[in-house]
Amino acid sequence: MTGTGRDAVREVLAVLPGSVVLLQPEYGPEGEVADFRLVAASPEAVDIGGRHGARLLGLSVLATYPGIEATDLWRGYLGVLESGAVYEGELEYEEKAAGIPHRSRYGVRVTPCQGGLIVSWNRLDTEEREQRRLALMQHLGRMGWVDRDLVGGGITWSDQVYSIFERDRSLGPMTLEELSAHAEAEDRPGVEDAVRRLLKIGEPLDLTFRIRLPDREMRHVRVVAETETDVLGQPVRVHGFFQDLTEAKLAEQQLLDQQQVTLAHQSLLAAERELAARLQDTLLPVPQQTLHLAGLTVDVAYLPLQEGLSLGGDWYSAIELPDAGALLVVGDVAGHGLDAVATMALLRFTAKGMAITGTPLPDVLANLNTLLLHAERNGSTATMIMAVYEPAASRLTWVRAGHPPPLLLRGGEARFLPSVGGILLGAVPGARYEASTVDLLPGDHLLLYTDGLIEKVDEPITEGLARLAGTALAHVGEPRPLEGITRALVAPQARRDDICALYISR
């Protein structure tokens, strides 16, 4: 293929959606095809290893995807190159990269193009991956969902509900009316009454009760359910979830010794309610989005280091509060993997729950500090910035725990907001935190971020902060300033940590 032809194909691929690449054959000494090399790719192309767009250029097919020479796809490549006929088929590939599900399925189409091959593909097992992700979230939250058709009579349980009740799956799910028979005697009247009001008048159910398992172990189970109604207002379907709160109850008892049981219990319930309502988005935040909250525009960037699974400790929250204000949070749990995700989920939902109930921000951090010190995964630490915006006063109240300070952009200048500081969460008992305030003016921009955006190996943090301030000012007038800031500060191949940031504009 000539350079001119390759350039023309690249121009076409540059505007194509989906995953499309151009392969150029490489020949051996006897004229046989020895390999193929990726010489052009569409911007949205993503391969099995999570490499995107331009990162695919120059890769050798045989070196990058070991074992492909034994597949029908490789034989399809050779056939298209020889005959010019289009090849379509499926590829089931054994992935070798660490942290990626071991087997994936793709639909592939191969067409000839100026002595090379145009290859396009789409993933066929996306639903399977989503199911695995959903199962992981249910396992971490010790919860499972239930769905009941009040008209047709069908009932569906997720696998986790069977585990909570230690019920034989061959018996199928039990009805809500049967719950009271499994509850401890003291809890039965409350269960019966709550279920009756749910099914008769559609009153939402949120109840914790005790059950005895076959081995006589006591288990605390929470059930939350609500109904869908028909045009006459009659309940026709029930949606809900069960959650095993046994370990949470043990933690609650420990917090009783610290005179904080009420607050901890309220925050836990609020966090769990959010977890149930947004099950698909509970543990892994949306990578990029723009939100409009309380008169503010909030751009979000979440760039996990492990793109295959997104199992990192960085996280954010940006929600509207019951009083029409806005809650804005950025946090960073030490480490990666499932332990970091579990700690992140605990902090994320508990912080939101306490903020929704109106708990003062310094008290929120103090209680999160205590919660980490007494959590199952003892030794976990985290940094965090938490802010509440009051639109009526245009005032932002914020606290931080060991986290880099917010950056305010105003009138062509950038400055980091001063505060009295606060030690990171989970470090020492009895830590105290204080709030700071700033009035946001029209045209102001505020940046909350994690240290992955500024830190470099063997560089003082002050240099990273100065670099951030200058870069943020340079991108203020752009349509998507946060995207420009992250791209300018951290190259994908040089990134060593997760990045999470909120760009707030008034």
Image (tube, rainbow, N blue to C red):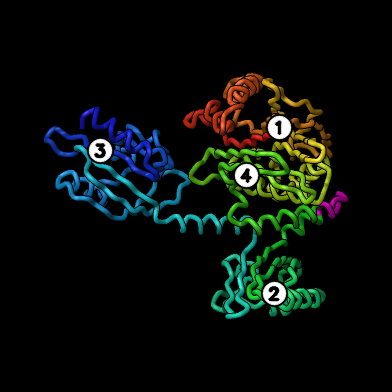
* Residue 84, position as x, y percentages in the image: 17, 46
Direction left: furthest residue: 30
* x and y, in percent, of residue 35 in the image: 23, 38
As drawn, 260 above or below 181? above
**Marks 2 & 4, CB-CB < 8 Å contact:** no
Q: Amino acid at mark 4?
A: Ala
Does residue 291 lie above or below 205 as drawn? Answer: above
Measured along the vertical axis of the image, is residue 62 above or below residue 201?
above
Of helix, strand and loop, which one carries label 4? helix
User: Which residue type carries mark 1?
Assistant: His
Q: Which mark is residue 340?
A: 4
Q: Earlier in the sequence, mark 1 or mark 3?
A: 3
Residue ID for mark 1: 403
Q: Mark 3–mark 4 contact, CB under 8 Å?
A: no
Q: Nearer the viewer, residue 232 or 333?
A: 232
Earlier residue among tags 3 and 4: 3
Residue 27 horizontal side relative to residue 210, left or right = left
Write down the region rendered in magenta: 254-263
Disc 3 is placed on an element classified as strand
Gap in Å between the C-alphas at discs 3 and 4?
Answer: 40 Å
Name the residue that disc number 2 marks.
233
Q: What is the CA distance from the residue labelled 2 to the residue labelled 4?
A: 44 Å
User: Would you say the magenta stretch is mainly helix, strand or loop?
Assistant: helix
* Residue on which disc 3 sits: 36
